Image (cartoon, rainbow, N blue to C red):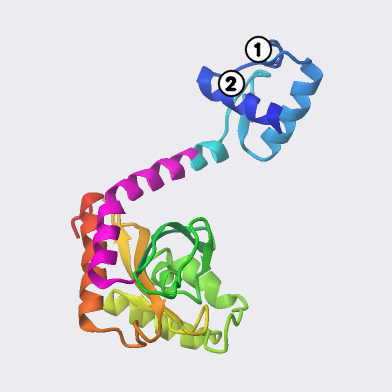
Amino acid sequence: MVLTLRILEHLVQQGRPVGVTELAAALGTTKSRVYRYLQTLRDHEYIAQQKDSERYQVGARLLAMARAQSENFELLTASRDILQQLRDTLGHATVISAPEHSCVRVLATIAGKSAIEIGVRPGSTLPLHGSAQGKLVLAFGPKELEASVLRSKLAALTPKTIVNPLALKREVAKVAKQGWAVAPNEIMLGANALAAPVFDASGALVATIAILNSVQFIAHKPAEDQVRRVVGAAQRISHRLGYTG
């Protein structure tokens, strides 16, 4: 594992294709050992091998990870104070999450003011069909993703989770029309989230911002003030990211 990281670090630092002999000398190990590691990294697309030589460089997968990390950093920078303001105004836990393959990943949270805490951990993932954030991804993300989810077997996380494809399709259409989503009792009994979409300069969905608390405080039909403030927070973050829609 340590040698793997050192190889990747060296390739990033060099910024050019590097051969096995040079890598082995720089890392103080044998060419045969470095070669084995290079083949594994290449097979998983973390590095790429030049077609006309035996030199290696940073691959598509590593570049994609770096780009995603950079985008997440920009997103967190643009949203942190707005996330705090939303928590201070409404008192509920606030959450910012980003779409990731077939789920939504929590990037940051701020605990609510309630004596009994309901929240999610940064780094955890939320399902597309059973969370308010996930419904936004289905409503405003790629249409092929929505179609793929509707064709798949929908897991019942609680007795209230929407597992019927036609019912989920209607729910997603409703979310797209109103511009926000809830998921009362769908991912955990007694809990609800109210979420709104965040867009970047290209108009692509890049995140969701949400408040989270018990169904006692965020009802199936949220208060107008809750909706207005969550949607407004999402719009302010979107504008900071260059969205003009």
Which residue is farthest front?
115
The 10 Å Cα crowd at callout 2, few under 14, some 14 to 19, many 20 or more, is some
The quadrant of the rendering that contains the C terminus is bottom left
Q: Indicate whether residue 186 is drawn in magenta.
A: no
Report x, y in % for residue 139. 38, 72
- Asked if the magenta segment contains residue 89, the reply would be yes
Q: Position of residue 81 (x, y in %)?
A: 26, 53
Judge left or right: residue 137 versus residue 162. Answer: left
Q: Which residues are magenta?
A: 66-92
- Which numbered disc, 1 or 2, marks the residue that appears first in the sequence? 2
Three-letter code for the amino acid on which mark 2 is drawn: His
Q: Residues within 10 Å of mark 1 (few under 14, many from 20)?
A: few
Label annotation for residue 10: 2
Q: Is residue 24 above or below residue 216?
A: above
Q: Identify the residue at image location x=47%, y=83%.
A: 168
Callout 1–callout 2 Cβ contact below 8 Å: yes
Looking at the image, which is closer to me, 27 or 52? 27
Residue for point 68% across, 34% down: 41
| Circle 1: element type | helix
Q: Is residue 139 above or below residue 54?
A: below
The spot of residue 119 in percent (x, y) is: 45, 68
Q: Main secondary structure of the magenta part?
A: helix
Observer able to see residue 214: yes
For residue 26, which numbered disc appears in the image? 1
